[in-house]
Image (cartoon, rainbow, N blue to C red):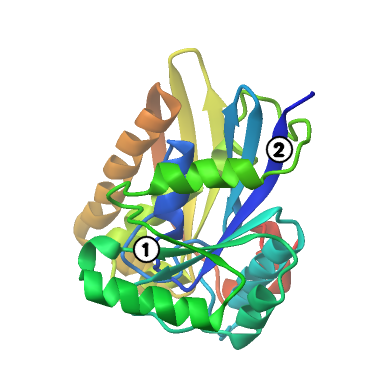
Amino acid sequence: MAGHKSGFVNIIGNPNVGKSTLMNAFVGEKLSIITSKAQTTRHRILGIVNGDNFQLVISDTPGIIKPAYELQSNMMDFVKSAFEDADVLLYMVEIGEKALKDERFLDKIKNSKIPVLLLLNKIDAASQELLEEQVQYWQHLLPKVEIHAISALQNFNVKEVFDRIIQLLPEAPPYYPKDQLTDKPERFFVNETIREKILTHYKKEIPYSVEIETEEFLEDTDIIRMRSVIMVERDSQKGIIIGHKGSALKRVGVEARKDLEKFFGKQVHLELYVKVNKNWRNDAGQLRRFGYNN
């Protein structure tokens, strides 16, 4: 395709800086979970934005952390791979932040051979003085990167960044069919929607001990029937997820169903179950099954 641009654009940064919010703003669909809790994104999720003469394949990655267990090591492998296949790298920081949680990633950015856009996010919460000070700080630390001040949540400067990315993309035919929105299967979004509700409604360790598996996804013309299992690591967590007379689990189910009906554009019947799956976060076989260390 003459004059057609295509490329992979990968977003990296510490947890909770707004990576998922930006990706969803670009794609126009809720592909990535957004909550106020850290480590919300566990996988690399590709969103595909198509125009007549471009295809932008954007990847949201887990926030950069020092891994404490096997699951987190696998999450950081997704971040490493983001450096390997990007045509443009978006390094997202929020106002007041000084470095990445892992210095090695900062060195990779300094030595990057591809264009890096540093996105200074959440500027709606900063004074002009602080903003100018931050721009100077990052210019000094990373002289080769291009700095853009944005607010992903308020959609401020998001279009300008998007247009700049399109300018930087190489000329290439599309990598995916032009009507495709993401590389993930439907069940993935069912799992992520349920997990988002658990992140929202449960405290402490519970959300991080949970994995979702959708065992059934049957689509008819006017309804989709789904059966999903919420896996926890301990019996005590199972009780907390279910709640008094099943009330907590019911709330998760009702809210997830509403979001899924919006996402799929048809009626959804969702059955939820809770199972104990001891120590899944450190079990290589289980992690592979859940798509972490392929």
Residue under circle 1? 121
Q: Which amino acid does label 1 sit on?
A: Asn
Residue at the far top in the pictured view: 221
Does residue 19 lie above or below 227 as drawn?
A: below
Amino acid carrying label 2: it is Ser
| Secondary structure found at label 2 | strand
Q: Is mark 1 on a helix, strand or loop?
A: strand
Percent x, y of residue 154: 27, 49
Dot 1 or dot 2: first in sequence order is 2
Residue 45 in sight from this viewpoint = yes
Question: Where residue 59 appears, x then y in whole percent?
Answer: 59, 52
Indicate which disc residue 228 carries: none
In the image, what residue occupies the spot 42% across and 41% down?
159
119 versus 98 height, above or below: above
Say which of 207 and 39 sits in front.
Answer: 39
Which quadrant of the view contains residue 257?
top left
- State left or right for residue 143 relative to residue 289: left
User: Residue 6 has which mark?
Assistant: 2
Give coordinates of residue 248: x percent, y percent: 24, 56
Could you tell me which quadrant the C terminus lies in?
bottom right
Location of the N terminus by quadrant is top right
Inspect this view and state whether residue 205 appears. no
Mark 2 neighbour density, 10 Å: few (under 14) some (14–19) many (20 or more): many
* Label 1 to label 2: alpha-carbon separation: 25 Å
Q: In this view, does 81 lie above or below 96?
A: above
The spot of residue 174 in percent (x, y) is 74, 31
Q: Which residue is drawn at 62% across and 29% down?
A: 180
From the viewer's side, name the closer residue of 212 and 69. 69
Q: In which quarter of the image is residue 132?
A: bottom left
